[in-house]
Amino acid sequence: MDRVTYHEQMNIDNTLRLREVLRTLPDFCRDYFRSIDATTSAKTRISYAYDIRIFFEFLLSENPAFKGMKMTDFTVDVLDQIKAVDLEEYEEYLKVYKNGKRVETNGERGLKRKISALRSFYAYYFKREMISTNPTVLIDVPKVHQKSIIRLDTDEVAMLLDYIEHAGDSLTGQSKAFYEKTKERDLALITLLLGTGIRVSECVGLDVEDIDFKNYGITVTRKGGNQMTVYFGQEVADALQKYLEVRKGITPLAGHEHALFYSIQNRRIGVQAVENLVKKYARQITTTKKITPHKLRSTYGTALYQETGDIYLVADVLGHKDVNTTKKHYAALDENRRRMAASAVRLREA
């Protein structure tokens, strides 16, 4: 039987989850999701499905015209009953709303994604002349303000790795035993993130077969399902090889035999577990920066750009489809280089 990769399994799981969500949506929605099947991942489709469901929940709870109706009662005609002002109210609603007993909030990025999902949804039915109006084009998509890059400085990277290597010196009892059990894994994992800039989702999806020590490369599955070889240096190779010696002594749960990184339950480690361990170690190094796996990716991207000055190389290695995405993130570094130009040229000798 062929090995099912982590990303293939995630795709299967998300496809099944999408079917469950679609059962709660109006029947006409199925046409839209069928139409985007070939151009989007299952993960994207399920995100869109949740976003569209929130829109219909808003209509049922906030719009008197639909009082007493069920979501599955809606037909495509409902889209023609919505005006631009209703969508502006929806944007306001999205900032803070109740989901059962939970209070949900959306910042700029969350708002933009949900309005973009609704625009795509409306566009499908409008282009096929199933509705005669498209009010989503009459409202502004929320603007996302660019945040400054949070990253570790060179000395902080060294301090972080040193801390992971020697944290056990100050521990005793159960804390020390737990640390020793996960030390080589944690060091290999964080060294890999810092030394390649791969995404946390790409990291947890790695199988042991994806490592090529001969060419110092790992095969990662990027967003959208494309595979790419990302190369690493000697420090990453050393950390991985030490961890693989420890990994030999682990008996994994059935179905997790190929996973590169294991959790303490001997199953493939998850995204949240990696986020938690990065935060745990980073807190010991800096209290002013909120370090996540994505910030380790930014740390790598910054170091690579400062070393090479090649924004296209950085975009390629980080797996950005559009170099403009990379430019947005690293524009501040260009600004610093431009400032250096001010003092590089002397008009008169002192």
Image (spheres, rainbow, N blue to C red):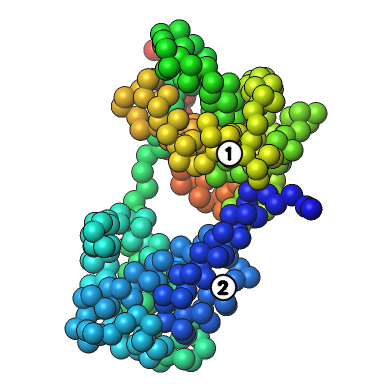
Q: Position of residue 143 (x, y in %)?
A: 34, 59
Please tell me whether mark 2 sits on a helix, a strand or a loop.
loop
Number of residues whose C-alpha sits closer than 10 Å to that of mark 2, classed few (under 14), some (14–19) or many (20 or more): some
Query: Quadrant of residue 206 in the image?
Result: top right
- Which residue is disc 1 drawn over? 267
Residue 123 visible to an observer of this rendering: no
The amino acid marked with disc number 2 is Ile
* 254 left or right of 14 in image: right
Q: Please name the amino acid that badge 1 sits on.
A: Arg
254 lies left or right of 73: right
**Element marked by disc 1:** loop
Is 52 drawn above or below residue 241 in the view shown? Answer: below
The answer to whether residue 94 is above or below residue 251 is: below
Residue at point 41%, 75% (across, down) = 24
- Of the pair 19 and 206, the residue shown nearer to us: 19
Nearest the viewer among 275 and 159 is 275
The image shows residue 62, relative to residue 316, as above or below, that is below
Q: Nearer the viewer, mark 1 or mark 2?
A: 1
**Label located before the other in sequence (1 or 2):** 2
Q: Residue at x 41, y 88 (%)?
A: 76
Other-residue count near label 1 (Cα within 10 Å), few / some / many at <14 / 14–19 / ≥20: many
Q: Left or right: 68 with respect to 174?
A: left
Residue at (62%, 54%) from the top-left corner? 9
Q: Position of residue 286 (x, y in %)?
A: 35, 22
Tag 2 residue? 36
Q: Position of residue 269 (x, y in %)?
A: 55, 38
